[in-house]
Image (tube, rainbow, N blue to C red):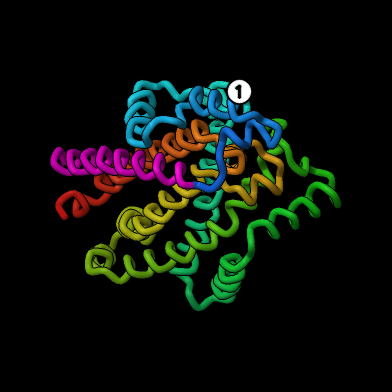
Amino acid sequence: MQRYLLQKAGGFVLTALLVSVLTFFIVQVLPGDPARLMLGTEGSPESYARLREEMNLDRPALERYVRWAADFFRGRLGNSWRYSLPVRELLASAFPLSLSLAFLAVGVALLAAIPAGMFMAVRPGSYLAQFTSIVTQIGLGLPQFWVGLLLIQLFAVSLGLLPPGGNNGAASLVLPTLTLALPRAAILSRFMRVGMASALQTDYVRTARAKGLPQSTVFFKHALRNGSLAVLTVAGLQFSQLLAGTIVVEQVFGLPGVGQLLLAGVFQRDLPLVQAATMVVVLLILLFDLAFDLCLGLLDPRIRYE
């Protein structure tokens, strides 16, 4: 387990360094001059040169990267050029919303997908299992923005049960969570069905049944643990994807999350904001992936020795 942990930690450090280099230099080559965007067309050449000097844009790219990376890993994220606020404050206001949506969406998706997939694996020929399979197939092809608009029309406009958008408490997160969870539940339920169906055909499950163990023990204790590994792996990937923010869903529901913050920063060429937000997202994704890999290693010892 110690060797497995060291390998994952080493991969974490190398990936973080590589992403920091790519993030900085890719942002630098985006079209548009940040100083020119801030001054507009009326700025004089003197003010333009002075502003570039204040923003350190007149220095070589390598020097700017070294200075930015050193400041970032010391916790100095700088100030946003667009908002004239510390980047730390902007990220602190946007990340809790994105984290909440990611946790809620993946949690709701798992709560719906695990029992649905288990039922389809145990009773594959039943009418209810076939109906569930058709529903999940439809869910895979539904666009998220359309699902969000449909939920707004039904629960906010027609029934008036939930707010149509905004960030005004727990009730305003219900519709965005459902919008994100429905297609993910469709994916996870199909992985759960395949995993459980495969686990139920293994030798150790046949041996447990031959020993006369109760069906519930065979199913939940022996088959579920190995049958759910693929589902947990995909759920971890989905959570990592949601951490970066879902720009479309945030736009539909008017949520000030990380996706909207990054989009605004890219459009305005707000380099401190874009670079810091991207790196924080990447570090969070790497941390959660590291924790998730360790959990999988504990659940399945074979992973630690591969």
Which image quadrant is residue 42 in? top right
**Residue occupying the far bottom of the picture:** 125
Is residue 267 part of the magenta span, yes or no?
A: no
Quarter containing the C terminus = bottom left
Asked if residue 250 is positioned above or below residue 134 in the image, the reply reads above
Whether residue 92 can be seen here:
no
At horizontal 48% and vertical 56% (from top left) the residue drawn is: 114
Mark 1 residue crowding within 10 angstroms, few (<14) / some (14–19) / many (20+) = few
Is residue 18 part of the magenta span, yes or no?
A: yes
Q: Which residues are magenta?
A: 1-29
At horizontal 48% and vertical 63% (from top left) the residue drawn is: 117
Whether residue 168 can be seen here:
yes
Find residue 145 and report its horizontal and vertical position in percent: 67, 56
From the viewer's perspective, is 136 left or right of 293? right
Quarter containing the N terminus = top left
From the viewer's perspective, is 195 left or right of 297? right
Counting every numbered tag in the picture gives 1
Q: Main secondary structure of the magenta part?
A: helix
Q: Viewer-proximal residue, 16 or 294? A: 16
Asked if residue 267 is positioned above or below residue 57 in the image, the reply reads below
Q: Viewer-proximal residue, 46 or 183? A: 46
Find residue 173 and report its horizontal and vertical position in percent: 66, 40
Q: Secondary structure at mark 1?
A: loop
What's under tag 1, amino acid-wise?
Answer: Ser
Find residue 63 and report its horizontal and vertical position in percent: 33, 31
Q: Viewer-proximal residue, 9 or 31? A: 31
Task: Find disc 1 in the rendering and name its residue.
Answer: 84
